[in-house]
């Protein structure tokens, strides 16, 4: 099971508590919950360098329900005990799920004495353990196929396409030359590494607007190249990297707003975007590569709200082939 399936946001989610000796049971339970679109967090969601116990307690406090996997190993688990105490402290409800064939499980002082147990061997365990927890599920569209956070297929693309929060990445070439999607909205998500794959919308015939209320980590190579009807792009949270020719040839593009800035612009990112009369950045990119704005005319303007010294880390030919007026100004 990949870490992509673990929910890292703060909407309603289940925290899975388990003994380290019950890893196999954990994966079986988590697989079913995730396959049924439930938001789930457990300790494999930890990032290298994080303080283990501190993060565990934080994730329990922020969760809406703890599912504890109960077995003959549970009572001896120091972390199961700490996690249950943390849940009690923060008023987080606990639902015990019996994952072995033990007839009687003795859990002294584990705060589980008065709770009803659900058995993993029961055919109705999933419905029983998630009863009343519809808010824990991702919003789903039956036309979208999502595997491990990647949108891999769309059987019937609508005119107004909404990418749900559970999607971390759009597959390379997924909507290439698509003739149906007019408006693209990428729903808000707590996931920090969302990306649009290479050539994802390249040559899309009618795509007109792109809106993402949060930032994107990466927009892939030629992701929107030659989208001749694309006029408006707004990405409120910023973009870490725009790959080569991401918007090249978008000749109708007239508005491009990225409030959070762009860290890396690769080769020919906006080549040929001759209708984008005004382009600005509030914070300096770490790199702008060769010919990022090639084909721009004298009628266009690029404004950077910082001084020219930041260009030292940019490629020498970053403005190659660009006739637009370029202004550096420290005052927004």
Image: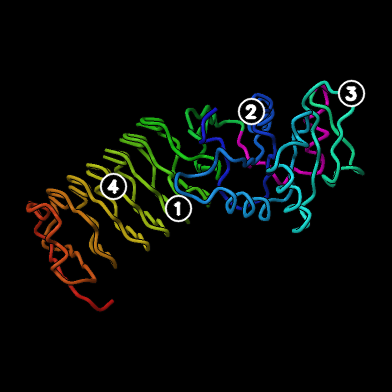
The kind of secondary structure the magenta stretch mainly shows is loop
For marks 2 and 4 on the same chain, the one whose residue lies earlier in the sequence: 2
Q: Secondary structure at mark 2?
A: helix
Q: Which mark is residue 103?
A: 3
> Of all residues shown, which one is farthest toward the bottom?
331
For marks 1 and 3 on the same chain, the one whose residue lies earlier in the sequence: 3
Cα distance between the residues tagged 1 and 3: 52 Å
Q: Which mark is residue 212?
A: 1
Q: Position of residue 188 (x, y in %)?
A: 53, 52
Q: Secondary structure at mark 4?
A: strand
The residue at which mark 2 appears reads as 23
Cα distance between the residues tagged 2 and 3: 21 Å
Q: Split into 4 quadrants, where in the image is the C terminus?
A: bottom left
Q: Residue at x 68, y 28 (%)?
A: 22
Front-most of 65 and 186?
A: 65
Labelled pair 2, 3 in contact (Cβ < 8 Å) = no
Q: Secondary structure at mark 1?
A: strand
Q: Position of residue 262 (x, y in %)?
A: 30, 56
Q: Secondary structure at mark 3?
A: loop
Cα distance between the residues tagged 2 and 4: 39 Å
Graded by Cα atoms within 10 Å as few (under 14), some (14 to 19) or many (20 or more), the crowding at tag 4 reads many
């Amino acid at each position: 099971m990949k870490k992509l399936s673990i929910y890292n946001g703060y909407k309603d989610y289940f925290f899975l508590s388990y003994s380290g000796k019950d890893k196999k049971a954990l994966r079986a339970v988590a697989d079913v919950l995730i396959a049924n679109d439930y938001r789930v967090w457990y300790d494999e969601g930890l990032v290298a360098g994080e303080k283990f116990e501190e993060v565990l307690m934080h994730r329990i406090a922020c969760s809406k329900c703890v599912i504890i996997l109960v077995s003959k190993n549970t009572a001896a688990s120091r972390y199961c005990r700490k996690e249950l105490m943390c849940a009690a402290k923060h008023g987080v409800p606990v639902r015990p799920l019996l994952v072995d064939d033990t007839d009687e499980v003795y859990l002294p002082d584990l705060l589980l004495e008065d709770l009803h147990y659900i058995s993993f061997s029961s055919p109705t365990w999933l419905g029983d353990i998630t009863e009343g927890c519809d808010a824990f599920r991702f919003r789903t569209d039956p036309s979208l196929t999502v595997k491990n956070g990647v949108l891999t297929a769309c059987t019937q693309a609508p005119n107004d396409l909404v990418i749900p929060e559970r999607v971390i990445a759009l597959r390379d070439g997924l909507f290439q030359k698509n003739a149906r999607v007019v408006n693209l909205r990428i729903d808000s998500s707590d996931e920090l590494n969302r990306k649009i794959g290479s050539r994802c919308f390249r040559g899309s015939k009618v795509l007109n607007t792109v809106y993402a209320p949060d930032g994107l980590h990466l927009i892939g190579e030629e992701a929107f190249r030659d989208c001749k009807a694309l006029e408006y792009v707004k990405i409120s949270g910023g973009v870490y990297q725009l790959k080569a020719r991401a918007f090249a040839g978008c000749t109708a593009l007239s508005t491009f707003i990225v409030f959070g800035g762009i860290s890396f612009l690769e080769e020919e990112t906006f080549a040929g975007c001759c209708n984008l009369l005004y382009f600005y950045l509030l914070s300096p990119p770490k790199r702008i590569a060769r010919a990022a704005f090639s084909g721009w005319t004298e009628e266009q303007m690029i404004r950077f709200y910082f001084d020219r010294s930041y260009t030292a880390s940019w490629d020498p030919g970053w403005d190659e082939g660009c006739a637009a007026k370029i202004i550096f100004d420290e005052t927004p």
